[in-house]
Image (spheres, helix red, strand yellow):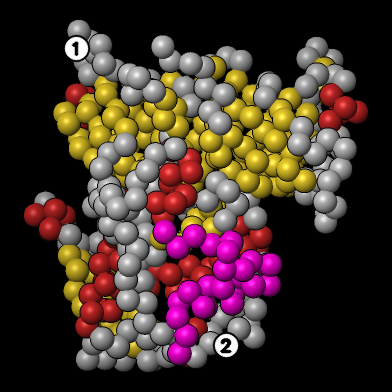
């Protein structure tokens, strides 16, 4: 029998540098409403509403800005972060409640300007990432250079050696390529170089940062089914929308390597990547990209494919709403996690759609609808960096 999904929020540490304070270790597990978002393109966050008209005096010390919390779903870590926002809405009928928002430390990297003094020459990509994040207090142990580690923390499943991993040749970065470009943030400076190698970085549920590539080659962990009336005994979705928007997708990308500083002269290094589906449908809108520091055909080919992929995410995407905060396999509940794959069978959207990559998961609980999860996915093969 399927058990009710549980959410627990534990106060890990008070604001500032104090080791402990009254209430550290306190666990909240009763909420008026909650929302938890994991996204590989943005910091994870959790929003909670708790209490009644006597709440503020009892909870104010626990929801002070900077207080650090861990959030668990069905006993498994979902995110580790700190209070960054709070408010106390009230009205004469409903009284007052306390709302607070927990976000991960990656939020700092989105806002802090990257240090212009970071100058690296003939060092690895890993060394650059560590250097640009150092002002935020990050060290090597704060990073996970393998996506399956973070994925397994959320889902509770072992996905090691399933699908492509992150072993790749990370060639040294030349000095003129590595310079921070004001006013780019720490996150943007790191992301700029990571994407050159087909990588991204996002939150791990334990507070570390994942450096990896979206892995849509792994076997599906979940199955989503929505079939027509009379054949819907196995249905497990509340609704699915399939979107195939080709409005902003180029038919082809011509990429030319240029010298440092962006000299606008075509070099002898170039690459071409096209979308066969759009060409076959009669579309025609090729684009030209100038790429600094691309000096080999291999790097040019990779960059051209990446540029086309970045513009093609809406080519075939799915948004789904499902009941509960986890997927029920028939015998066990597996929490929904990002950087995973679902097999989708939807009659109304063309039959068996196949494998889709989950890049955003939003868990919600409120008094009106109970527990509901919203999933954002793209078709396997679309998101290639």
Residue 164 at x, y percent in the picture: 28, 57
Bounds of the magenta segment: 122-146
Residue sitting at x 68%, y 21%: 30
Q: Using the image as rendered, state which of residue 335 and residue 283 is in the foreground.
A: 335
Left or right of 148 in this view: 302: left
Q: Main secondary structure of the magenta part?
A: helix
Which mark lies nearer to you, 1 or 2?
2
Say the numbered circle drawn on residue 119: 2
Please, which residue is most extreme toward the top here?
Answer: 230
Please, which residue is most extreme toward the left here?
Answer: 280
* The quadrant where residue 69 appears: top right
Q: CA distance from mark 1 to mark 2?
A: 62 Å
Residue 250 at x, y percent in the picture: 25, 61
Q: Using the image as rendered, state which of residue 248 and residue 15 is in the foreground.
A: 15
> Please, what secondary structure does the residue beneath circle 2 have?
loop
Residue sitting at x 26%, y 91%: 267
Residue sitting at x 80%, y 12%: 93
Residue 4 visible at all: yes
* The quadrant where residue 187 appears: bottom right
List the residue tagged with mark 1. Answer: 231
In the image, is residue 140 part of the stretch drawn in magenta?
Answer: yes
């Amino acid at each position: 029998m399927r058990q009710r999904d549980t959410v627990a929020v534990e106060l890990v540490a008070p604001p500032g540098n104090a080791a402990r304070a009254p209430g550290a270790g306190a666990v909240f597990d009763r909420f008026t409403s909650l929302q938890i978002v994991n996204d590989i393109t943005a910091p994870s966050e959790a929003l909670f509403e708790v209490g009644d008209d006597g709440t503020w005096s009892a909870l104010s010390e626990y929801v002070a800005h900077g207080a650090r919390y861990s959030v668990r779903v069905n006993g498994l870590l979902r995110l580790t972060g700190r209070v960054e926002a709070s408010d106390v809405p009230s009205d004469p009928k409903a009284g007052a409640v306390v709302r607070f928002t927990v976000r991960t430390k990656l939020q700092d990297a989105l806002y802090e300007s990257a240090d212009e003094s970071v100058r690296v020459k003939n060092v690895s990509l890993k060394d650059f990432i560590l250097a640009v994040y150092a002002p935020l207090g990050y060290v090597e142990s704060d990073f996970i250079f393998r996506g399956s580690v973070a994925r397994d923390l959320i889902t509770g499943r072992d996905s090691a050696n399933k699908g492509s991993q992150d072993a790749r040749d990370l060639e040294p970065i030349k000095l003129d390529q590595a310079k921070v470009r004001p006013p780019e943030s720490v996150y943007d400076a790191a992301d700029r170089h990571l994407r050159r190698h087909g990588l991204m970085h996002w939150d791990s549920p334990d507070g570390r940062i994942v450096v990896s590539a979206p892995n849509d080659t792994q076997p599906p962990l979940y199955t989503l089914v929505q079939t027509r009336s009379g054949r819907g005994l196995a249905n497990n979705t509340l609704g699915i929308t399939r979107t195939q928007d080709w409005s902003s997708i180029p038919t082809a990308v011509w990429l030319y390597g240029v010298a440092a500083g962006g000299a606008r002269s075509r070099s002898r290094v170039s690459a071409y990547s096209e979308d066969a589906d759009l060409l076959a449908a009669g579309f025609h809108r090729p684009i030209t990209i100038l790429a600094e520091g691309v000096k080999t055909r291999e790097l040019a080919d990779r960059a051209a494919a990446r540029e086309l992929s970045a513009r093609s995410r809406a080519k075939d995407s799915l948004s789904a709403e499902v009941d509960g905060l986890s997927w029920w396999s028939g015998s066990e509940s597996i929490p929904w996690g990002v950087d995973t794959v679902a097999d989708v069978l939807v009659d109304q959207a063309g039959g068996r759609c196949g494998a889709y990559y989950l890049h955003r998961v939003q868990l919600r609980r409120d008094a009106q609808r109970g527990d509901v999860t919203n999933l954002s996915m793209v078709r396997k093969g679309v998101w290639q960096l």
